[in-house]
Structure formats: structure tokens, C-alpha cells
Image (spheres, rainbow, N blue to C red):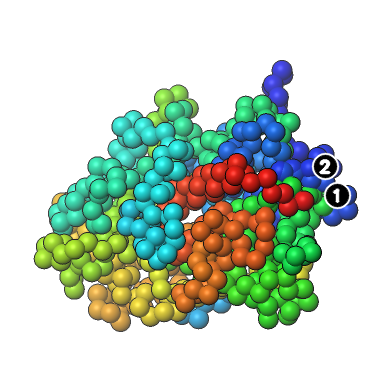
Amino acid sequence: MWPFTSSYPEVKLYELSDQYDYIIVGELSIFRTRKLAYTCIIQGGGTAGCVLANRLSADTKTRVLVLERGPLADSWASRVPLFSSDFASDGSRTLKIPSVHQEILGHPLELYTGKGLGGTTRINQMLYMRGLPAEYDAWRDAGRKGWGWEDLKPFFLKSEHANYAADSSVHSKNGSCTCRAVEACRDVGLPYIDDINSPEHPAFGCGRLHFTRDSDGHRNSTYHAFLPKELALKRKDNLHICTTTMVSTLEIEVVRDGRRVVKGVHLFNEHGEERFVRAVLEVVLCAGPFSSPQILMLSGIGPAEHLREFDIKVIKDLPAVGSNLEDHFGVSIAFRIPMRDSLVSLEKRIWVFFMELFRYILFGTGMLLAPVLQVAIFSSSKFLDEKGIPSKTKLAEPESLPDIEIMPMAYDSGDSQVFDKSQGVFSFLNVLLHPESRGTVRLTSNDPAALLKIDPRYLSNPVDFAPLRASLRLTLRLCDRMRARGYPLEDWEVPEGEDDASLDKYIVKLKRHRTTYHYASTCRMAPENDPRGGGVVDDELRVYGIQGLRIADSSIFPWVLGAHLQAPTVAIAEKCADMILKGRESSDVRIA
């Protein structure tokens, strides 16, 4: 700590106030004896929680408590785009959870989520992608009032400060092979999209991705954007941020008229301290698609039969809690390329590393300025012929949503942290955007510190194979065009053939498939008895049957969007804050 500067105003468990208006609850975190209270308690200082905390604490009369299981964990390296884009990091900013054995794949997968202020925005690829308007209009058409594109557009704009023209990262030193991939897209008939966030762009093409960076070229997580030190210090009297703290259960009471009302949260930390904190107005779960359903189930809200297995008193039988888990499943094809064009050179050639480090520090340019992924290729598999080439006839048909995305990157995108780095590597991650397979999140104990039983059930619905086959064939055609243009791609990890059987065999090949960390829909926004899988929250994000409890994270998606989830999750938090504030203006209701 430099002299004469103030540290980030974190609040320890024993320093919590007597009352908060809102409590924001993050990744399942850590007390139970003394009774304290806030206007709002927010469980989760992650992607959504930081946004909510900023908006709700703007009124100095509103007392807001943010609870986050992870630490502040802020350092210079954690803000360098390339260094910090690492889900499998040292553990200070990530939580690793093994899935159960996957029947189709033949083994479990490692699942990762962010922890610490900013959550997954501290470790992801920093990609800002809204998705096509039709994605949200499909939510609206399914009955989600107020969740169409035009409804959400103001909330996207509210948190944006766009500076696309200044973003030249696609032309950085490791851009040679990436630029060749863009040229190959044009060769096969996929247009280049100038603005990948434009609502007018087609449902197929390729384009440069937008990153959440600040003007100094640093990672701009929701922690840095919405809860920077200056703001936290200014609002320290009414905004309390408690890190390394977890929620064990919610306190829910049945009042005289039979309503079930959330009164606050029971907390604990790694030192064994316990405490109860009271919420005057609301508790908002922003703990993510794994921990939000976990907190509900530990509190007696969820599938009744499952809760009784662990002697948890059933407060509300809500079968959809922890069900309908979706993720963008990915399959990687990899090639050997010249070392100079690959990010592997940073690891194998020490002079390259130091040269790039100095370029970034002195000029804010070079390989460290961008994450591994810089360009996206997307299409509907319906647009591709049997060889994977976009069909001019099919492209002329009425558009449908993209169901595949191809991510070219100058590194191995397979599910392996260890690979032969004697040569450069370039890979294409083929991603299924609209899976039909659904998984579950379940408890293994009534102990909040116990590991969850997470079963994504990847590829359990056989229809998910067809889009992946189409994507792999398109990738191979792009590689053909790159070679035709003279780029030296050498086969390394590729399918043995292009028939369905060979591609299916490759899709389930060990270490070539992976999660893309886009988990969603375990607390769906849908009618409680929705035939697609039931619902947990209504269109105002209120948990069915429980007054004063909302959820605002990717777990509420009716189904996973065909986009990267950072921007939509921020928009959900903005909309949730707006609904809470408008509701407070029109009502004097208190829950405590």
C-alpha cells in the first residue's frame, strides 16, 4: 500500500451493520448468531452483483450489503487482458467443480466459475456480445413480458461506453493466422461483419469481437466498472462489501396471512464465524447458475423429494430449481503453425515474452492487449451443405438464429492444460449455441460447504450432434482455403474423416471437447408449470411463493442465448435494479 492512499473499503463479518435495505448474495460463501439488518442484501459480487450494488446504493438512504465468497484479489497482472483470461488459474479468482461422469463422453469434465469481486468478468475472455435481437424476441414470444429486444436495449446502452474504432487488437502480432481465417471465411461465402453488436447484422458471418477494456488497455470487469475504489469509498456509509463470506441459508418466515417472506441471510466464513443479517426490503441472489439454486435448495426451496433426502425442511416445492442446466458445448480442431504466429511463443521464447511485456507496459500494444479469442465465426447449420460450405440457395432463405460458433485462436482450445509446445498451435473451437441437452445441479449434503453434484448431460439429446458435425465440416473448409492461400497449417488434432461416424467419434474424443463456461437456466424465468421444464422466477425475477426474494444472473435465462453471456447478464442486472427501484417508488412495503 502506497503512503497516503486508502485501501478498498471491504467490510469484515464482525463489522456488518444492524440493518440493510438490500442484500446482494454472490457465490455461495460464509456467520449466524447476532442479528443485523440491511435494506437490501445482494448475494454475489460477481458479474451481475456489482451492477446491482452500484445502482441500488446510489440513494444514500438505502443501505446495501454485498456478500461475495471470493477475495478482492486485485493486482496488476489480474488486469492484463491476456494474463487474466484464465479460468484454470491459481484458484484465488476461480472455483473449480468436477461434473459427474458424462455418459456420452465417457468421463467427467472440469467446470469453472469466477469468484471474487467481479466474478467471472475477472477471468473470462472479456467478450462483449449482445446477441441478435431475435434471441430476446424469442423470449418475449414465449411469454416473457418485457424481455424482448426493444425492452432490453435501453439496459444494454445504459452500461456501455463503446470505443470500437480504437480497438485494433485483431491486427496485433499474433493476428496473422486469425486474419487468414477471416479471409478464408470470405472465400467460402461468409461475410465480414463490421460491428458484431449491430442489431442489423445477419445470422451468419465473421467479425472482430468487442472487449471490455478501459482506456488504458486494462481488463474492465464489472468490479472495476461498477464498484471501483473511488465509488466504494464515497458510498462506504451505505454500501458495505463483505468478501470471503458465504451464505448458508436464507431465513424465511411464514407470516399470519400465510405468506412466506424472506427475512435475511445466515452467513459464515472460513474462520468459523457465523452471523445472521436482516434485510428490510429484499434479498437478491446473484450467485450464478450453480450457487443460486444451491442457496435456494439449502433454504428449503426446490424439488421437495430431493430436499427431503438431506432432511431439509420444504418451504416451497419448486421442481425447476437446479434443473434445465444448459451450456455451450465446444469441440476443438487443432493445427501446428509457425511458432512466431502462436501464443505458445510467449511461453517457449523468453525474449518474446519480455518484448511483448515491455510493449504493453510502455505503449499499451501487442499480444498482451487482447485475450486469446479475438474473432468469431457464426452461422446456422441449416445454411451449410453436406460439405460444410455455405449454400447460396439456403443463405437466401428466411434467416434463423445461429446455432454454431467457431472460435479461431492461436493456442490449443482443447480441454487440456498440458500439450506439446515444441511448435506453434492454432485451433478452432466449434461451439453448439442452442443445445437441446439439459442437465441438473443437485445437493450432496445439507452442508453449504459441500461440493455440488453437477450433471450437464452433454450430448444426451442426440440432435445436438448434427450442428457440431456441420461446424466441424465448415472449419475444415476454412482450413482448406487457408492452405490454398499459402498458410502452412499442419494437421495435429483433426477428425479421421468427414462422414458422420468419424465426426461423432471425434466429438466425444478425450481432451478435444470442453465446456465454454456459459452455464445458464437453472432458475428459469418461466411459468411455474411451464411445459419446457418449469420456472423458478416470474417476469419481475421474483421467486415463486417467496416474498422479498429475487434472482439476477444467467440462471434465470429461459434458455441459453446464442451469444457470450457477459453482456446479457449485465443487462439483466440493470433491468433488475430498474424493477426494484420502480417497485420501491410505488410501494412502502417492507419485509422486516
Q: Is residue 70 left or right of residue 112?
A: right
Q: Amino acid at mark 2?
A: Asp
Q: Is residue 237 left or right of residue 82?
A: right
Within the image, what quadrant is residue 380 found in? bottom left
Which residue is located at x 32 percent, y 53 percent? Answer: 132
Which residue is located at x 29 percent, y 66 percent? Answer: 471
Which residue is located at x 17 percent, y 70 percent? Answer: 385
Q: Is residue 375 above or below residue 445?
A: above
Residue 392 percent coordinates (x, y) = 11, 62
Which residue is located at x 72 percent, y 64 percent? Answer: 260
* Label 2: which secondary element: loop
Residue sticking out furthest to the top: 4
The answer to whether the residues at label 1 and label 2 have Cβ atoms under 8 Å apart is yes
Q: Earlier in the sequence, mark 1 or mark 2?
A: 2
* Label 1: which secondary element: strand
Query: Is residue 474 something one can see in this rendering?
Result: yes
Nearest the viewer among 559 and 518 is: 559
Query: Is residue 339 something one can see in this rendering?
Result: no
Q: Is residue 565 left or right of residue 308?
A: left
Residue 485 percent coordinates (x, y) = 15, 51
- Mark 1 residue crowding within 10 angstroms, few (<14) / some (14–19) / many (20+): some
Residue sticking out furthest to the right: 33
Residue 35: mark: 1
Q: CA distance from mark 1 to mark 2?
A: 7 Å
Residue 112 percent coordinates (x, y) = 56, 59
Residue 268 percent coordinates (x, y) = 80, 54
Q: Amino acid at mark 1?
A: Lys
- Mark 2 residue crowding within 10 angstroms, few (<14) / some (14–19) / many (20+): some
Nearest the viewer among 307 and 368 is: 307
Q: Is residue 572 left or right of residue 256?
A: left
Residue at mark 2:
18
